[in-house]
Amino acid sequence: MTTLTDQEFIRYSRHLLIPEVGLAGQEKLKTSSALLIGTGGLGSPIALYLAAAGIGRIGLVDYDVVDDSNLQRQIIHDTNTLDTLKVDSARARMLGLNPHIQIDTYNEPFTAENAMHIASGYDIIIDASDNFPTRYLSNDVAVFLGIPNIYGSIYQFDGQASVFYAKEGPCYRCLFPTPPPPHLVPSCAEGGVLGVLPGTIGSIQATEAIKMLLGIGSSLVGRLMLYNALEMSFDYVKLKKNPKCPVCGENPTITKLIDYEEFCGVPGHHIDAMPSEWDISALELAEEMKNASLKNISPLLLDVREPHEQKISNLPNAKNIPFGELASRLSELNTAQEIVIFCRTGNRSLHAIEILLGSGFRKLKNLEGGINEWAEDVDNSLPIY
Amino acid sequence: MNKITILFFATLRTRAKRSTMELELPNEINIADFKKILITKIPALEASLHHTLVSINKEYAFDEDIIPEGAEIALFPPVSGG
């Protein structure tokens, strides 16, 4: 007795025609479940293709709202769903595509406190998150639940994908036992990303998820796929399980979820730059510059953005040292002069202040909200990006 | 001496300002020593290399693995974007 309705037979006709899927496979997808962590760049194509494929129950975890700057790549969302919850926006689009499935939404950050509760009962986890704490958390949850974690990650033009399934191969921690130091690896918000890149990598994750649920083909278990869009190259690295892995090795030292934000030294969700004692607002800076120019003692404006960002917006007479080069170019700065540091939104500049403090600089200020806040409050002729 | 080829990916490409390079190494050295030598050639990599996935001839390599003659070594930093 089939579980598919007449409407579903028509809908899934092209799946039913492939012997590797067929009726049994389509019924399997209908009774399967997948938990998607993140409904952003990677999550968009994953959610759409899993919904279209007829995965019976799909969970969506995200706490964010749809923003203008998302729509260059997060194609499940829409200009009409700006400022609405991403999980709601995604759910509506998925049910519009396929009303025969169930979508469960979790409008909250995925954390050590709620992760096991949310994830238990799902057949697979798909890691479409955008930060290291959530990636380590997704990995550990999948290891503890004994289910596959379909991994994908992107940076500018580079993408990585794999399937971490500790029962059959290595996990994320086997490859990357310790996270990189905070702020060494730029996020999409800091480093930028080609809009179509998450389309490519997310589609590969969706493919792997469907294959794992069906139990067909050769999965990416034990292989890391590396894609570069500029060179249009696909490379594969054969992976090994690390016998010393702290979660899936022979003598695991991590047997329950830990504090992932502490482990990675960064928050697992986006927060606006924390207010700091170094902050100066755009309006205060404008006032200070007006007074200082009367006394002829202007502070140095230090722009730690990348050179190509200066073509978008600029402050007059600013000196540019990209954040990544700052540590090796300190000799160009004078500890006696007051320095006001700025970037796009005030995050990189705050990390720049940490570097400068460590090298004896004390007369420092951080332009709160970055040049975008200056554009908003002081000089409306500049674009906000 | 052992002449190897190094491939840089993602953020390492930016830091090393190149995508590939050739390097002469003493014979029979392991990945941990190779990393130290590479840092002397490209100091900008120092902060990143300890957290980078290394492969020898497209197979994952641990720090203690010995580098064979004429190997292709690829360096894949973790990326987190989504």
Image (cartoon, rainbow, N blue to C red):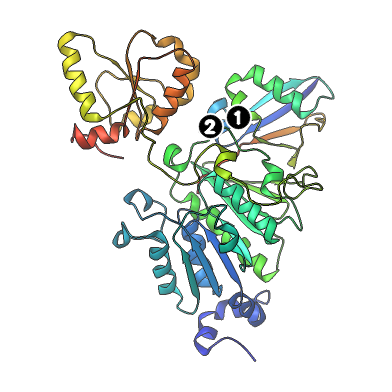
Q: Residue at x 56, y 72 (%)?
A: A55
Tag 1 near tag 2, CB within 8 Å: yes
Q: Amino acid at mark 2?
A: Leu
**Name of the residue lying farthest toward the right:** B28
Give residue A344's mark.
none
- SS category of the residue bearing label 2: loop
Q: Position of residue A180 (x, y in %)?
A: 59, 35
Of residues B12 and A277, the one nearer the viewer is A277
Hey, which residue is sitting farthest bottom in the picture?
A1
- Pick out the residue farthest to the left: A294
> Is residue A86 shown above or below A11?
above
Looking at the picture, which amino acid does disc 1 mark? Ser
Q: Residue at x 46, y 47 (%)?
A: A269
Residue at 65% x, 92% y is A1
Give how far across and how far down residue B73 sits, in percent. Answer: 71, 33
The image shows residue A256 at horizontal and vertical percentages of 67, 52
Left or right for A48, reference A334: right
Q: Quadrant of the C terminus of chain A?
A: top left
Q: Which numbered circle lies on residue B48?
A: 1
Q: Which residue is mark 2?
A: A184
Q: Which secondary structure, mark 1?
A: helix
A103 to A129, vertically: above or below: below
Q: Give the residue at x 46% y 59%.
A: A44
Quarter location, residue A99: bottom left
B35 to A69, vertically: above or below = above
Is the residue marked by circle 2 packed among few (<14), some (14-19), or many (20+) residues within 10 Å?
few
Judged left or right of residue A215, residue A207 is left
